[in-house]
Structure formats: structure tokens, C-alpha cells
Image (tube, grey):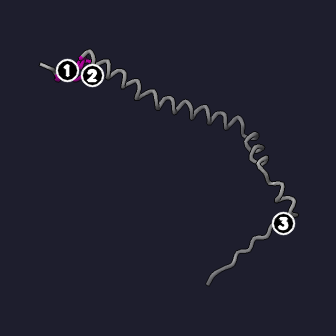
Amino acid sequence: MGELLSIKFSGSNNSLNQFTINWLVDAFCNYKPLLAEILLSSVFVNLLALMIPLFFWVKIDKLILHQATITLGLGFITNR
């Protein structure tokens, strides 16, 4: 009906005691160039994602302030 799975670690107990945070630091050091490229591209994409809405926000505010709806292609909307 059911199966039993047994896992036995081979080696001495010292190998388990040596598993510290240094292993993670070494892994990060091995992939340092790749991680730097990923970080740089992530920052670029996030800045672009923030700048696009801010750009349109400023443009729309300037157009509304000067009532230049013709610039938006909304020339049929007038305040008369």
C-alpha cells in the first residue's frame, strides 16, 4: 500500500558541521558577473517602468494646464 523512503547520509558528521554560510558566499562569488548583469538589467527595467508613467503624467498635466487638447488628438473637445 505505501512505500518507505529511507535516506542515509554517507560520510562523517564533520561534513555536515562544515555546511555554513560560507558555502553560499562562495556560490555567489562564482556567479558574480552573471549576478551583476542581472542586477543591472533589473535596475534598468524598474527605472524604465517608473519613468514612463511619470513622463506621461507631466505631459498630460502641461497639456491640461494650457488647455491644449488638440495636441492629444482630442480637438473635438472644447470648453465653449
Percent x, y of residue 44: 55, 30
Q: Which mark is residue 15?
A: none
Above/below status of 57 relative to 25: above
In the image, which residues are magenta?
Answer: 67-77
Percent x, y of residue 6: 74, 74
Q: Amino acid at mark 1?
A: Gly
Would you say 25 lies left or right of 66 here?
right
Give me the C-alpha separation between circle 1 and circle 3. 78 Å
- Which circle's residue, 3 or 2, is located before the other in the chain? 3
For disc 2, the marked residue is 72
Looking at the image, which residue sits at the far top?
A: 66
For disc 3, the marked residue is 10
For disc 1, the marked residue is 75
Q: Residues within 10 Å of mark 1 (few under 14, many from 20)?
A: few
Q: Amino acid at mark 3?
A: Ser
Q: Quadrant of residue 71?
A: top left
**SS assignment for the magenta stretch, majority:** loop
Magenta stretch: includes residue 45: no
Closest to the observer, 59 or 71:
59
Percent x, y of residue 52: 42, 28
Give me the C-alpha separation between circle 3 and circle 2. 71 Å
Residue at the location (15% across, 20% down)? Answer: 79
Magenta stretch: includes residue 74: yes
